[in-house]
Amino acid sequence: MLDLLAYDFIQRSLLAAALVGALCSTIGVFVVLRGLAFMGAGTAHAAFAGVALGYLMGWPPLLMAMLFGLATVWITGWVEEKGRMKLDVSIGILYTATMALAILFIGLMKTYNAEVYGYLFGNVLAVTSEELGIITGLSIVVIGAIVLFSKELYFIAFDQEMAEASGVPARRIFFLLLTLVALTVVISLKTVGAILVFAMILIPASTAYQLTHSLSTLTWYSVLIGITCSVGGVLISSYWDIPSGPAIVLLATLLFFVAVIFSPKRQRRSLALG
Amino acid sequence: MAGQSLPIIHFDHATFGFPGVVALEDISLEIQSGEFVGVIGPNGSGKTTLCRAVLGLMAPLKGHLRIFDCACDELRCHHRARIGYLPQKGVVDRNFPVTVLETVMMGRYGALGLFTRPSGKDLKIALNALAHVGMEGHRESALGHLSGGQQQRVFIARALAQQPDVLLLDEPTTGLDITTQHSVVELVQHLHEELGLTVLLITHDINMIRSRVDRLVLLKTRLYAAGPPADVLKPDILSQVYGKDLVITENDLVIVEDYHHHH
């Protein structure tokens, strides 16, 4: 397996996977705690519609993905804030509407475009140096913002109203969180794809959630699990020649079930019931 | 208890609500620094609206509200960190991964402002707040593993960690057993006396607080009465607000029909 590391494209994909793993698992902590799990899925599909429109019109696909992703999270955030309808309903509507748009845009293309499908399923082994540069730059921006506003993000994840009442600008921080979720999805599209990015946001944080009662420990565990699964998944994928996205996500899922079985929380509940 | 200085909270003919729905109407009320005020009233009487107004989360539709030196007419309030708030007891997710100390440290975040990391000084303040509520031995415990009464103590410590001038408690005893209710209210009274905090305690439980507060405020959309408990808890005023005849016995306030039934 070690001789694989000599290849440039393997080095690039390992670095991209580690970055995306760290990024998704960090933002995932706040997504899971704030109850925005479904938002990740909705944003991913909206971003894919952006990619499809980009290819259809000859516009930059990643920029279009970003616009579609941001529009989706801001609209759903606004709807939640106004209390007009439940969040899962509004995301459900946007999720399916943007997927319909994606199918429409693909249908309008005169020829089969394999690159579009690359964004749907992801292929970390095909990441170019230029794309790695974009992933690195955007990852620094998103992780920097999370570090800078971590105390406020933790507080609104715990109790947004209490945070607002304590003088934290909770509403602005909530929209910052939504924006970071959208950026994370866009950054991860090329590596894990629109369908699987949601899993990378959700699973490492949910796995860490099984293992600790401390917010800070949860975040470190989540990042560690995210990087391990992404890098491990790429190595498995290149060694056994299987698609990288599923390798990463299935490894993460396996770890999740191991954590559920050995969770101290679960054992505590069993003791309490017994 | 009431000083001669300017009141720290001043409602001046203030009306709150949403377009078409009035939750509180024409409220005029002054609260002085260092007072212990109980706010009572039936369900839907506007107690929680009063709470949100004091927190600066709701601007008056009519009239004025001033808190400290901040006119809260346009929701550009900078006083929130000076009010330690204990929200109505929600059901804490027993698996929410937060320790007692992490919860109390959140009390520092509003006062610190954006971009500032908590320092050793903030940690000391949080530990001191935990000591005030008698929970210093639980700093590393999971919040979800504590009893309801212990969780309320932790949330009170979180409010204290803000180093507030005012402690605002929204039904702090709801959902607790009777012994724990007493210990929570005793703790609040102790903090009021020891730290000189102005306390606004919103409750349904008149009996629990009437011997402890300086003043009672009785709401039912309008302000029906405000003053020392003996002046507010008069059968004629209470029956107007609660719609039943109430009588004050030596120790308790009871509904007349129940009183006759038992005597």
Image: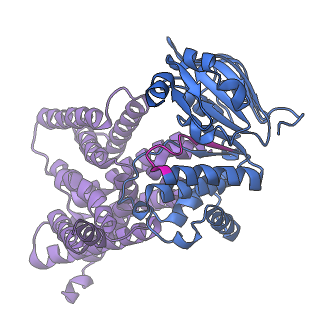
Determine if the magenta segment contains residue A138: no
Looking at the picture, how far across and down is residue B131, in whole percent? 64, 66
State the purple chain.
Answer: A
Query: In the rendered image, which quarter is residue A112 located in?
Result: top left
Q: Is residue A156 visible?
A: no
Residue A214 in picture, x, y percent from top left: 44, 67
Residue at the spot x=85%, y=32% of the render? B6
Instruction: Write the residue at 54% across / 47% down.
Output: A163
Relative to A180, say whether A132 is above or below: below
Chain depicted in blue: B
User: In this view, which residue lies farthest toward the right?
Assistant: B4
Residue B242 vs B162, above or below: the answer is above
Residue drawn at (69%, 39%) of the image: B213
Nearer to the camera, B154 or B2: B2
Q: Quadrant of the C terminus of chain A?
A: bottom left
| Residue A92 in view here | yes
- Start-end of magenta stretch: B167-178
Front position in the image: A3 or A206: A206
Q: In this view, does B235 lie to the left or right of A214?
A: right
Between B64 and B240, the one lying in front of the other is B240
Left or right: B44 as drawn, with respect to A60: right
Quarter in which the N terminus of chain A is drawn: bottom left
Q: Name the spot of residue B79 as percent of width and height, x first.
A: 71, 40
